[in-house]
Image (cartoon, helix red, strand yellow):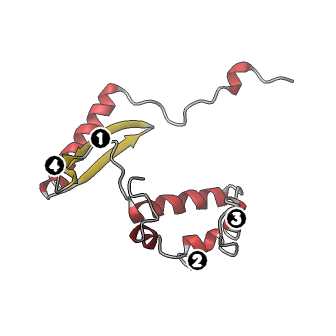
Amino acid sequence: MVPEKDSLVKKPLFPPLSEAEKTKYHDAVENMLNHSLYRSSFNGGVLIAKNGTIVYEKYTGFHDLRQKDSLHADIPFQIASTSKPFTAAAILKLTEEGKLSLNDPVTKFFPEFPYTAVTVKMLLNHRSGLPNYLYYMEKGKWPRTQ
């Protein structure tokens, strides 16, 4: 039996936001940020989305303080450790779904990875023994524009 054509179309996980909802969320976020973050000398970007729709986006400050060039959406940022909780949650969700194991070696997903004994769990626990990536930046091996 062949499935009906309509059953093959993937429906969105969340319904799209109405214009009134976008405005409501935008105004709530802007109000909160104006009374907190933006009162300081914040330098960076804020992007907030709901149901796959951007409801707030603002860049403030400078990319290079010496040249006073304003920040914008195309400026690369080093996000450092802010992505760790999102990455951990995604990995644990994949583990829960049986799509990977915490004991899988990283080389299962990245065959060229040079540390064959490192597992997913070791990365999540920060116990892999990998060298500090900042050393690569200091020695000029990491393109600062990426």
- Dot placed on the residue nearer the N-terminal end, 4 or 2: 4
Q: CA distance from mark 2 to mark 3?
A: 13 Å
The residue singled out by tag 1 in the image is 57
Which element is circle 3 on?
helix
Along the polypeptide, which appears first: circle 1 or circle 4?
4
Q: Is residue 61 left or right of residue 117?
A: left
Q: Which residue is mark 4?
A: 34
Please tell me whether mark 2 sits on a helix, a strand or a loop.
loop
Residue extending farthest to the left is 39
Task: Kindly state the secondary structure of the residue where label 1 is placed.
Answer: strand
Residue drawn at 20 percent across, 51 percent down: 62
Work out whether mark 2 precedes mark 1 in sequence or the reverse, and give the earlier one: 1
Callout 1–callout 4 Cβ contact below 8 Å: no
Instruction: Point out the residue furthest to the top here.
Output: 5
Q: Position of residue 29 (x, y in %)?
A: 25, 45
Q: Position of residue 1 (x, y in %)?
A: 87, 24
- Alpha carbon separation for disc pair 4 and 3: 46 Å
- What crowding class fits label 4: few (fewer than 14 Cα within 10 Å), some (14-19), or many (20 or more)? few
| Kind of residue at badge 2 | Ser
Q: Which residue is mark 2?
A: 128
Report the residue that reaches farthest toward the front.
140
Q: Residue at x 59, y 60 (%)?
A: 91
Q: Label 4 is placed on what type of residue?
A: Asn
